[in-house]
Image (spheres, rainbow, N blue to C red):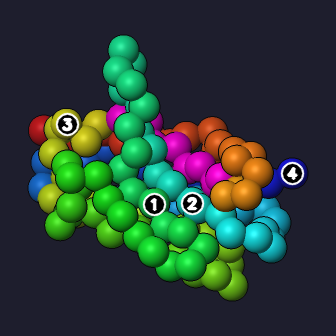
């Protein structure tokens, strides 16, 4: 069973930065993808950024140039560096791991990010 623990959320002013972390409890020995999603009440969950086990990365258009996803393989941790934050980035940010072959999907508990002056 894969367990994910997010950390690093908080409250910042517009233009500020935060770095989120997603620590995975166990190794995965097949292709997988780690994604950061965000959820606003009343809206559909949105994919923000993802990194495949191969190293391929992609971003939502709304965060390109501001957010950077990265990983520390030894620590089994994926990071989301968020710069130039805007009020519309306010959401609960959730980490997800999906095993490509089986489509098994695991979610963390989420961390709140609030951008407000």
The Cα–Cα distance between marks 3 and 2, rounded to whole angstroms, is 23 Å
Q: Earlier in the sequence, mark 2 or mark 1?
A: 2
Provide the secondary structure element on which disc 4 rests.
loop
Q: Nearer the viewer, mark 3 or mark 4?
A: 4
- Check disc 2 and report its element: helix, strand or loop: strand
Mark 1, residue position: 50
> Of label 3 and label 2, which has the lower sequence position?
2
Does the magenta-highlighted stretch encompass residue 94? yes
**Cα distance between the residues tagged 1 and 4:** 21 Å
Indicate the position of residue 76 as horizontal and vertical percent values. 68, 73
Q: Nearer the viewer, residue 9 or 56?
A: 56
Q: Nearer the viewer, mark 3 or mark 2?
A: 2
Q: Secondary structure at mark 3?
A: helix
Residue 23 in the image: x percent, y percent?
Answer: 65, 63
What secondary structure do most residues of the magenta stretch adopt?
Answer: strand
N-terminal-most mark, 4 or 2: 4
Left or right: residue 116 compared with residue 6: left
Tag nearer the camera, 1 or 3: 1
Q: Residues within 10 Å of mark 4 (few under 14, many from 20)?
A: few
Q: Residue at x 60, y 74 (%)?
A: 53
Q: Position of residue 2 (x, y in %)?
A: 79, 54
Give the Cα distance between marks 3 and 4. Answer: 34 Å
Tell me which numbered mark, 3 or 4, is placed earlier along the sequence. 4
Q: Quadrant of residue 34?
A: bottom right
Question: Residue at the location (67% across, 58% down)?
Answer: 100
């Amino acid at each position: 069973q894969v367990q994910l623990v997010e950390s690093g959320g908080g409250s910042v002013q517009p233009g500020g930065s935060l770095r989120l972390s997603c620590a995975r409890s166990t190794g995965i020995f097949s292709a997988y993808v780690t994604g950061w999603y965000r959820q606003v009440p009343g809206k559909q969950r949105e994919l923000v950024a993802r990194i495949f086990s191969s190293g391929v990365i992609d971003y939502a258009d709304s965060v390109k140039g501001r957010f950077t996803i990265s990983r520390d393989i030894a620590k089994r941790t994926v990071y989301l560096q968020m710069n130039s934050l805007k009020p519309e980035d306010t959401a609960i940010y959730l980490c997800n791991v999906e095993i490509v072959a089986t489509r098994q999907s695991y979610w963390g508990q989420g961390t709140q990010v609030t951008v407000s002056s």
